[in-house]
Image (spheres, rainbow, N blue to C red):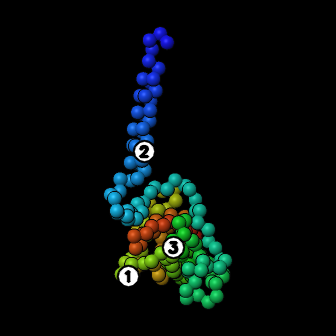
Amino acid sequence: MNGVDVERPRKNIRRWAGRLVLIVAVLVSGCTAAGTTPKARPPSPVVSRATGCTSQIQTGPLPTWARTGFSGDGNGVRHVLARGGDILGVLFGGTLSSPPTPERSNKILWVSRVPVTPGGSLEITATLDGTAETVRRTVVGGPGPSGIDMPKPGCWHFALAWSDHTDAMDLTYEPGR
């Protein structure tokens, strides 16, 4: 064929494709050392861009793992399940408000589906939807009862971190009186 080596370009393509596959494999693996398990990192606040509140308040039965201390299946209890399904917030005051109303506090019972490290805490990084406004709250002792107030009404994106676990949910705070 006119002295043109057709196989040379094919070999170069195969060699570069092989290198690309190796590079992608290293990137996907996260460069984790053999025999180690990567720990969950606390969530970092992210500036929200008007994504809205996607977590839904439910009043149906609580998940089986969250029913301890409730009579029956917890049907009718207002709750929000986090996106990853590892934590649930039971809203005892009904509607959350900012500022809290005199007759009702912003009480949230946090229930973890995953094991909780004794003596730890639940760290909350909350970002107001569509803004860079971020506040931090800590529930000492880890998931459990809390009063979580936000400085303004609106949709708050909660990044939750506890016992080497992370999850996220959105909570809406209505205007208080």
- The residue positioned 38% from the left and 53% from the top of the image is 30
- The residue positioned 44% from the left and 11% from the top of the image is 3
Which residue is denoted by mark 2 in the rendering?
24
Q: Is residue 3 above or below residue 98?
A: above
Crowd tier of the residue under label 3, counting other residues whose Cα lies within 10 Å: few below 14, some 14–19, many 20 or above:
many
Which residue is denoted by mark 3 in the rendering?
87
Q: Where is residue 93 in the image (x, y as percent from the top left)?
A: 57, 81
Q: In this view, does 54 lie above or below 163?
A: above
Q: Is residue 154 left or right of residue 19?
A: right
Which residue is denoted by mark 1 in the rendering?
118
Q: Is residue 24 left or right of residue 173?
A: left
Marks 2,1: beta carbons within 8 A: no
Spatial separation of the CA atoms under disc 1 and disc 3 = 16 Å
Indicate the quadrant where residue 139 lies: bottom left
Crowd tier of the residue under label 1, counting other residues whose Cα lies within 10 Å: few below 14, some 14–19, many 20 or above:
few
Viewer-side residue, 25 vs 137: 25
Q: In this view, does 121 lie to the left or right of 158?
A: left
Indicate the quadrant where residue 94 lies: bottom right
Say what amino acid the circle numbered 2 marks: Val
Q: Where is residue 99 in the image (x, y as percent from the top left)?
A: 51, 74
Say what amino acid the circle numbered 3 marks: Ile
- The residue positioned 40% from the left and 53% from the top of the image is 29
Task: State the SS at label 1.
Answer: loop
